[in-house]
Amino acid sequence: MSRSERRVGTVSRGIRCPIIRKGDDLAAIVAESVLQAAESEGFALRDRDVIAVTESVVARAQGNYCSVDDIAADVRAKLGGGTVGVIFPILSRNRFAICLRGIAKGAAKIVLMLSYPSDEVGNELVSLDQIDEAGINPYSDVLTLAKYRELFGVNKHEFTGVDYVEYYRNLIESCGAECEIIFANQPRAILDYADHILNCDIHTRKRTKRILLAGGAKVVCSLDEIMNAPVNGSGCNELYGLLGSNKSTEDMVKLFPRKAGGLVLDIQDKILKATGKHVEVMVYGDGAFKDPQGKIWELADPVVSPFFTDGLIGTPNELKLKYLADNDYKDLSGEALREAISESIRKKDADLKGSMASQGTTPRQLTDLIGSLCDLTSGSGDKGTPVVLVQGYFDNYTHN
């Protein structure tokens, strides 16, 4: 390998930015922050670098917020204000609890149906071992709150220390609504308790709604149908409603960003004009990866990336180097092996789907892979890096 050859592959950098406020020119701030970071750290931008902007600052710059009372008004208008079955919510103080406040304020009674042993994104109410020991079949058995307590007692979340069953019950009652809690995994179970249903699952919402309507529910709304239009001048999200929202204050919800296709193109254009380099740009939220300890797989947003430039469409098209080294070129070593593998990469097909030489590569959308990398890079706390620059992601073994 010559000295001129690049010795580093993919690099992910968190880019510090000013605190973003409503009305800020986010495209200008992002482009300037990336250019200043490049100058400060002594690196250059290259074609096909990826600039990723977290969804939270996009929504903040847009001022895309709604209040608990706005949610209540929308729930009341769409679900009647009487008894509402609220099913399959995730267990989250940041993601769902504030939405539940609005939902409860828009109903006389909430029948809360929790999935078990865990919610959709892996937060456990009880462990599988506890389920087995109790002789319960989670696919068919419906548990009342009294039965749940009898079998499992109090189970606090491993990381937050919160008993979400009690937390959600107290929250609903504090908003003036009556509360009944059941535990079930079949959507139709709620129909014995209510016929106006709000299904709060994220990635399975279309199937759940279909099953409920086929089962005789009178009205079914998914979370993406609440706050999908402005209420009393509020923000909204036409595609995702309350999905992807986060707590902002005790009474305000930051919604998922909307209509940011122009933003990613604007950032791309500003970098091109400043450097002559054609970068890709995306907005990202939660990554999609599973924590081995808590079993939480993170993706509480409806998608990893709601907006991105065209160069990020598709999936990786990569050869597995260790497959080539262990099979096709098992008798080669040193420079001969390196050159043989390099030649295979240079001549690889445009679509390797089904090829044995690509087995073990990751067949996920580029935006899901890069967004997950960015989510891990930026973190969710006080790093102050809502922009991530990924370099070398599209390089391969042959690139210098």
Image: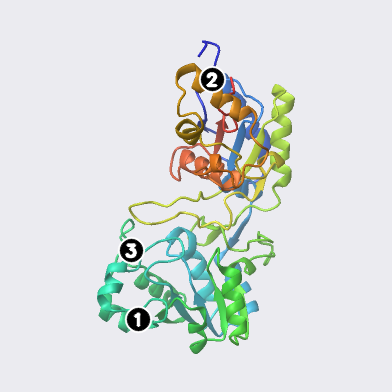
Instruction: Judge left or right: residue 158 versus residue 232.
Output: left
Give left or right: position of 315 versus 249.
right
Describe residue 205's horizontal placement relative to residue 326 as left or right: right
Amino acid type of the residue that numbered disc 3 sits on in the rendered structure: Val
Label 1 sits on residue? 145
Front-most of residues 68 and 306: 306
Category of crowding for the residue at label 1, using alpha-carbon neighbours closer than 10 angstroms: few (below 14), some (14–19), many (at least 20): some
As shown in the figure, which amino acid type bears the numbered disc 2?
Answer: Ser
**How far apart in space, not on screen, are marks 2 and 1 (Cα)?**
58 Å
Q: Is residue 221 above or below residue 4?
A: below
What kind of residue is marked 1? Answer: Leu
Instruction: Name the residue rendered at 49%, 83% in the picture.
Output: 190
- The residue that disc 2 covers is 40
Q: Quadrant of residue 179?
A: bottom left
Q: According to the image, label 3 marks what residue?
A: 162
Measure the alpha-carbon separation of dots 3 and 2: 43 Å
Question: In the image, residue 307 lies at what x, y percent?
Answer: 66, 47
Residue at 49% from the left image edge and 70% from the top image edge = 101
Query: SS at mark 1?
Result: helix
